[in-house]
Amino acid sequence: MTPSINSVRRSYAAVLVLLALVLVGGCSSMYYDAMEQLGFEKRDILVDRVEEARDAQGEAQETFRSSLERFQSVVNTPDTDLKAKYEEIRDAYEDSEAVAADVRDRIDAVEDVSGALFEEWEDELDRYESASLRRSSERQLQETQQRYAQLIDRMHQAESRMDPVLEAFEDQVLFLKHNLNAQAIGSLESELGRIQQDVDALIQNMEAAIAESQSFIDSFQTAQ
C-alpha cells in the first residue's frame, strides 16, 4: 500500500523535529539515526564532511596568504596612515582566526562520524553468516581505516601549522596596538621573514591535506 502524501509529510516533519532536537542536544548517535531514516548512511555523511573539511582548508589557505600580504603592506606605510593599517591587520588576524576555527570544527566533525562508522562496521561483522563475505567486508574496513588514518594525520599536520602563524599575527597586532610608529613597523619588518616561512609551511601542509582528502573521497566514490 502506497503511503498517502499526508503521512509522508508527517514522517518528514517528525524527522525534521528530531534533527532539531539532536542539534540542540548535541547527540551524534541520534543525528546519525535520523539521517539514516532520510536515506543518508554514515559513509555518505563522512564523505560530505571530508569535502567540507577540504573546502575549509582551501579557504584557510587563501585567507592566511591574504593576511600575510596585509601584514607586509604595513612596512612601507607613512606614519599618518598607520591607524588605518593597524585596523586592517587586526581584521586580517581576526579573519585568520575565524577560518582556523572552522578548519578545526570540520576536522572534529570528520572524526566524530568516522568513529561512529567504524564502530558500526565492526559490530556488523559479527552478523555475517557467510565467512567469505565477512572476510571481504573486514578487509574493506581495514583498507578504509588505513586510508582514513593517512587522511586525518594530514589534516592534523596542517591544523598544527596554523597555531604558529596565528600566534605571530596576534603578537604583531598587540604590539602595534600601542606602538603605532616607525619603530614598531621596523619590529614587524624583522619578523616578517619568519612569519613568511610559517605561512609557506602551512600552505604546503594544507595542499597535502587537500590532496589526501580528494584521494579519500575518490576511493569512496569508486567503491560505491
Image (tube, rainbow, N blue to C red):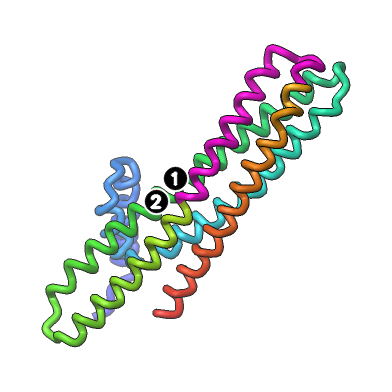
Pick the front one: 196 or 90 = 196
Q: Quadrant of residue 188?
A: top right
x and y percent of residue 16 in the render? Answer: 34, 54
Q: Quadrant of residue 190?
A: top right
Please name the amino acid that badge 1 sits on.
Asp
Q: CA distance from mark 2 to mark 1?
A: 6 Å
Q: Which mark is residue 105?
A: 1
Pick the front one: 10 or 19 = 19
> Which residues are drawn in magenta?
156-185
User: In which quadrant will I find the N terminus?
Assistant: bottom left
x and y percent of residue 178 in the render? Answer: 68, 12
Please name the amino acid that badge 2 sits on.
Ala
Q: Residue at x 19, y 80 (%)?
A: 134
Q: Is residue 194 left or right of residue 205?
A: right
x and y percent of residue 139 in the render? Answer: 27, 77
- SS class of the residue under badge 2? helix
How many dots with numbers? 2
Residue 165's place in the image compared with 37, above or below, is above
Say which residue label 2 marks. 109
Residue 173's place in the image compared with 14, above or below, is above
Q: Residue at x 77, y 34 (%)?
A: 72
Q: Residues within 10 Å of mark 1 (few under 14, many from 20)?
A: some
Pick the front one: 109 or 30 = 109
What main secondary structure does the magenta stretch of the protein show? helix
Q: Mark 2–mark 1 contact, CB under 8 Å? A: yes
Q: Residue at x 33, y 52 (%)?
A: 112
Camera sees residue 6:
no
- SS class of the residue under badge 1? helix
